[in-house]
Image: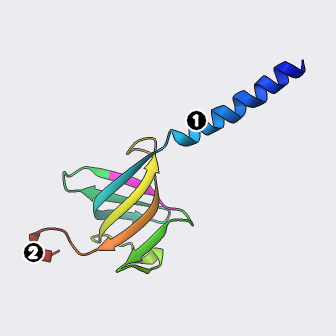
Amino acid sequence: MRTIRTMAIVAIVLGGALSLSAHEDFRVIGTISKQAGSAIDVKKREGTIVSIRIDKQTAISRDRKKVDAAALKVGETVVVDAYGDSEDDLLALEIRLVPPIGRGGQK
């Protein structure tokens, strides 16, 4: 009985470690197309839209200075470092507000 219990504990610990390592890192670059409290939608250059969750640990900055989540507005250009199982399930680790990319710096 003790062996079975030990094996079950080991399986649970290993299963938890594997699920944590299953997440991949993603970088999403584009323009905020929607902002809704705990998530933003980012339109990438290719035209696809990626929804990214935001939490209290998400670092948000502009010019390497920390800014509040209120700075995340539709039309802002962002570089988002996130993690998740796929682009359909992302949590932002860091969001950098950057000048518009391309078109000579024009929005």
Which of the image's four quarters has the N terminus?
top right
In this rendering, would 91 be left or right of 33?
right
Q: Residues within 10 Å of mark 2 (few under 14, many from 20)?
A: few
How far apart marks 1 and 2 lie (CA) works out to 45 Å
> Residue tagged by mark 1?
18
The residue that appears at 85% across and 20% down in the rendered structure is: 3
Q: Residue at x 30, y 62 (%)?
A: 33
> Eyeballing the image, is 78 above or below 7?
below
For numbered disc 1, what is the local secondary structure? helix
Q: Give, as a three-letter code, the residue at label 2.
A: Gly
User: Magenta residues?
Assistant: 50-54
Q: Depth check: 18 or 54 in front?
A: 18
Of mark 1 and mark 2, the one earlier in the sequence is 1
The percent coordinates of residue 45 (x first, y second) are: 19, 56
- Which of the 4 image quadrants contains residue 85? top left
Tell me the SS state at disc 2: helix
Q: Residue at horizontal 65%, vertical 37%?
A: 16
Give the number of the mark in front: 1 or 2.
1
Q: Main secondary structure of the magenta part?
A: strand
Q: Residue furthest left?
A: 104
Residue 8 location (% of width, % of height) = 77, 25
Q: Quadrant of residue 35?
A: bottom left
Residue 29, horizontal then vertical, whole percent? 28, 60
Q: Nearer the viewer, residue 97 or 17?
A: 17
Q: Amino acid at mark 1?
A: Leu
The residue nearer to you, when weighing 59 against 31, is 59
Circles 1 and 2: CB atoms closer than 8 Å? no
Q: Quadrant of residue 107?
A: bottom left
List x then y, in percent, for residue 75.
Answer: 27, 70
Q: Which residue is mark 2?
A: 104
Per the image, is 22 magenta? no
